Amino acid sequence: MEKRQRQTFGMFMDIRKNGTSYLLVLPAMVYTFIFGYMTYPYMIIAFQRFNYTKGIFNSEWVGLQNFEFFFRSYKAVTVTFNTIFLNLLFIAFGTLTALVIALVLNELRKKLFVKISQSVMLFPHFISWIVVSYVLYAFFSMDMGLINKLLNMLGIASVNWYTEPEVWPAILTAMNVWKGAGMSAVIYLATITGIDETLYEAAEIDGANRWQMCLRITLPLMMPTVIILTLLSIGKIMYGDFGMIYALIGDNGTLYSTTDIIDTYVFRSLRQIGDPSEAMAVGLFQSVIGFILVFGTNAITRKFFRDGALY
Amino acid sequence: MKKFSLSKTVMYALISIYSAICFIPMLLVLMISITDEDAVLKNGYSLFPEKFSLYAYKLIFTGGSQVMQSYTISIFVTVVGTLLAILVTSMAGYTLANKHVKYRNLLALYFFITMIFSAGIVPWYMMNRMLGLTDNILALIIPSLLFSPFNLFLVRNFMNGVPDSLRESATIDGANDITIAFRIYLPLCTPVLATIALFYGLDYWNNWWNAIMLIDDQDLYPLQFMLLQLQSEISMLNEMTMLAGTSDMTLPSESVKMATAIVTIGPIVFLYPYLQKYFVKGLVIGSVKG
Amino acid sequence: MKKHHAFVLTAVLALSTLVGCGKASDPEATGNTGGNSSEPQSENNEKAAETVKIKYLVPGTEPKDYKEVYQKVNEKLAADGVGVEVEKVYIPWDAWDQKLNLMLSTGEEFDLFHVMQDRTPFSSYYNRGALADISDAIDKYGENLKKSIPDDILDGAKINGNYYVVPSYWVEMASEGQFNIRRDILRENNLEEPKTPEELISAWEVVMKNWKGSNKPYLGTRADFDPIFLHTSMLHRTYDTFPFTVKDKFFYVNQNGEIKSWIETEEFKKDAAFMRELYTKGITNPDILVMKQEQVDAQLDSGEWFVRLGTGGSLNGLKKYNPEATVDDIGVVWFNPEKEYMRPLTFKNGNAVPVNSKNPEAAVKFMDWMLASQENYDLVQYGIEGEHYTKDGEKGFKPIRDPENNNNSRYRGSDSQNGNVNFIRFDLETSIPDNNKVLFEPNPNAINSIAANFVFDPTNVRTEYTNILSEASASITPIYMGVQEYDKAFPAALEKMKKAGLEKVMAEYQLQFEAYQASQK
C-alpha cells in the first residue's frame, strides 16, 4: 500500500511540476481514452456466446470456448507461423530497402532528381491492392503472363506460378516492400534532416570521407528511429495485412500453406457463420501475443539501447 | 574539372531503377484509364492503348454538382483534419519528449496499448453515436483519424534529438512549456511535422470508411466514397447483368477502376512537393552552441 | 488506413447488442426524408388510421430518381389505404455485411432488410436472435404473398413452424442444372448442340482449335467445390443416381433422404474427372484457381466465350465478338431433358424484419402490396411509366435510357431483391429469351429436393464446420476444378478434411436432418 501511495503521490507531484506539459498532452489522452480505452469493456464478448436479443449483459458466458475454433484447428499453427514469418520478412526487407533509399538519396546532389524520385516512390502506396493484383496477374498468369512469355523465349517451359506455394513469400515480400518503402524512406529522410550539420563539418575537418560519415554518423543517429519503427511493427506482428493477402491470393487454396495468415483464415471461416464472439476472441489473441512480444523486445532494447526504446 | 565517381553513378542508377519500378505501374494505370473499355477487355492491360477514350473520366465527373461537392468536402476535411491532428500530435509529442516529465514513459505505454488492442467496429460505432458524431462534418474529422499513436512516436523520437540545452536556456528566461513547445521545438521539427502532415493528409484524403459507417447525408460524402460507390455499383451491375441476362448496358469497369485511382492521386501528387520544402533543417540548431 | 482495416476485419462480423444502452433515443438523422408526407414519428402504438413509416435497408446505390419514384409509391400506398410509407436506404455493396451487422447490433431502428441466402442465409441471422417472427403478419396481411408464392417455397421461410423471412420468388430454382451455349459459334464450326458431356468436350475442343479471336473461350468461373455454386450440377442429370442434390457444399442428399458426404461420393469423383479432362485438354482457364469475379464478367462481356455453366452473357457482349449475333444465339442446354427438374433450394433472396423493429406488420403489408397488382409491381421495379420505361406487350418493357446517365434509365428497382416471376417484365430487345424462359417462368412440374427447405444450424459444431470450410477451399477445390488429379491428390485431401472434423459435422447434419424429417410428418 505504501509503495502505491507513494507512486500516485509521485504522479501528482509530477503533474504539479510539469503542469503545462501535461496540459499539452491532455487532448491526445482524452481522445485515446474515449476511442480506445472506453471501448475495451466490449471485448468481454469474446467470452460469451453472443446473441442480439440478449445483448452484452445477458448473453451466456462460455469461458474460453470461443477460442477453441481457432486453436483446435490444426491450421492454427500454420497460419500463425505464416503471419509472423511474413511480417518478419516484411519488416526486415522493408526497413533495409527504405534505409538504403534514404541514405542514397541523401548523398545525391542533383536536387531536381531527388525531388522527383522521392515523389515517384510514393506512387505505389496509392495503387490499391486490387489493382496490384491485376498487374501481378499480368506478370504471373500461366497463359499470357509476361514472365512465362520470357521463359518460353529462353526455351523454358511455363510455370504455373499460382500453384507454387514456395515462391510466394518472396513475391509477397517484394510487393510489400515496393508498396511501402517509399513512405518509410520519407520517415528516415526526415530523421536524417534532423541530424546536426556541425557533426558532419567536424568529421570533414578530421578527414573522413562520405562513406565513413555515413557509417559513423548517419547510421548510428538513425538507429533510434529504426528501432522505434521496428518495435511498432513487432507489436502488430500478429496482424497480417489482410487487404494485401486477400487481394493477391484470394480464394486460391493451393497457396494457403505459405500465405494464409490469421486474418484471412478467420475471415473465411466466419464469413457465413458471422459469429462476433469468435472474431473478437481471435482478435484478442492477436493483440495479447503482439503485446507480449513488444514488451519483451522493448525490455531488451531498454537494456542495450536506451534511446530507441518505446517506453 | 568534372569529378567522376563510380559510386555516385551506381547510386543514381539504383534510384533510377527503383523509381522506374514505381512509376511504370502508375503509368499503366493512367494508360488504362484512358483506353476504350472494349479494347481493354480484348487486349488486356497495355501501355499502348489501341483506342483512346475518356469515357471513364466522363463517367466519374458527370456526377456534376455532386462530384464538386464531394471534392469540396474532401479538401475541407483533409485540411482541417490534418492541421488539428498535427496540433494534437505534436503537443503530445513534446510532453513525451520532455525529460522533466517523470512519467513520460508511462504515458508512452498508455498510447501504445491502443495501437495493439482494439475492440472492433461495434463499440467504435456506438461511441460515435453517443458523441453525436453521426451525419455531420465532424464525423469525418474526429473518429479514427484525428490522432495516431504511430505518428506520435515519430514526433517524440524526433524531438528527443533536440538538445536539452535549448529548453534549459528558455526556462531560465522564464518560458513555460507551452511557449517552449510552440516557439522553439515546433519550428525545429519541421521535417517530422511535414512527415506526419503527409501521413495524416493521406489518411484523411483516402478515408471512406467513416463516411460509409457514419454518414447518410449525400451532401457530406467525400470524394473517395463517391468513387467507391461508383466502382462497386458498376461491378455489381455487371455481375447481375451477366447472371440474369438482363438488358442493361454494362459499364466500363476496368477503365473506371483505373480512372478512380488517378483522380484520387491527383491532389496528393501536388501535396508532396509542397511538403518537401519543409524537409530542411529547422532553425540552425548549432546557433545555441555559439 | 491499414491499421484500422486490420482491426476491423478481425472483428469483421462483430455484433453486439447493448440493448437500450448506447442507443440514443434520437432518431438517427438519415438525412433527406424525401418528398414524402410530413408524418412525424408515429411509431408508437395505437395507430389505427395513421400512416406507419418503415425503413427498408438494401445493398446497392440509390438510383437517380429514387425520391421521385418513391414519392409516387407512397402516394399509391396511401391511395390504396395500406397505411404504410416506405423509405429505402441504400448501403454500398462493399460495406453491406458490416453496416447491416452494425445496425442490427446496436439496435438501430429499421424495419426491413434484404437477405441473400448464398451470402448469409436467414437462418444465420435467426441463430443470432436478430429476426422477428412474422407469422402473424403473414397470416393477416400476406394474402397476395400467398397467392404469388407457392406454398412449398413459403415453407422454406419457416423455422420451427414460424415465418422469419419473406422469400422472393423471382427466379425459378428448378433452373438449376443447365448451361448456356453459343449457337452462333456452334454454327461457325458446323457443330451440333452437344447432348452428352463427352459431346460437349469434343465440341469445345474443336471450338478452341479454330478460335480466331484474341482470347480463348476458356471455361471461366470462380473456383469452388460446390456444384450448385458452379452449376456443375448440369453433369448430375446424366448420372443414374439422379435426382439428388448437394446442400451447403458438403451434404449429398437424394430423394430417399439419404445423406452422404459429398466429397466422398462417386458423383464427386465423376464430376472431378470431367473437370480434369477439361483442364488437361486446355479448355479450362489455366489460372482458374485465381479467377476473380471481375475477370469472369469481363470474359462474358467481351463475347469471347463458348459455354457458360448456368446462365450468363448479354447481347451487348456477344456483339463485341460477333456483330451479327442475335438474342437467339445463346441457348439453354439440358442434359437428359427427360429427367425430372428439381429445386435444390426454394429461394435465393428474401426480406426479413429485424427483431427490434416496431412495425413488422407494416413491413409485411408493403411486401404484400407490391404483389397486389402488376401496376404496383411495375411502379416499384421499373419506375414511372413514360419516364423510366414503356411497356412492351404483356411481359415486356423498354427502359427509357438517359444519355446523361450513361445511357441507363434513371430508375430501376431490383427484381432479385423483391421480385416475383408472376409479375416480372423483360427487356425483349436485349434479354435472352431462352434464359428468360428457364429462369423466370414458374415451372409447375418441378419437384423440390427433400432437403430444399431444411436449414442446417452449425452452432454445435462451429469449430469443425469453420475448419472444414477452410480446409476444403485449400485442398478440395483444386481437385474439383481439375487442377489436381483426383487419384493422386484425393486421399491426402480427405485425410486433411477428416482431421479438420468432417465426420463430426456429417453426424450433426444427419441428426438435424432426421429431426427435420420427423417434424415434417
Image (tube, coloured by chain):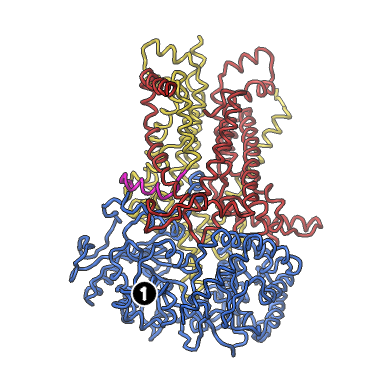
State the residue lying farthest toward the bottom: C338
What segment is highlighted magenta in the picture? B118-133
Question: Which quadrant does the N terminus of chain B fall into?
Answer: top right
Quarter where residue A228 is shown: top right
Residue A49: percent from the left, percent from the top? 45, 55
For the residue marked with disc 1, what is the amino acid? Tyr
What's the residue at 27%, 55% (across, down)? Answer: C27
Is C455 covered by the magenta stretch? no
What's the residue at 50%, 54% (across, down)? Answer: B259
Residue C268: percent from the left, percent from the top? 66, 74
Q: Which residue is mark 1?
A: C382
State the residue in front, C212 or A185: A185
Quarter where residue C52 is shown: bottom left
- Rendered hue of chain A is red
Left or right of residue C139, residue B124 in this image: right
- Rendered hue of chain C is blue
In the rendered image, the vertical position of residue A198 relative to residue B39, given as above or below: above
Residue A76: percent from the left, percent from the top? 62, 51
Residue B83: percent from the left, percent from the top? 39, 35
User: Which chain did the renderer colour yellow?
Assistant: B
State the residue in front, A13 or B190: A13
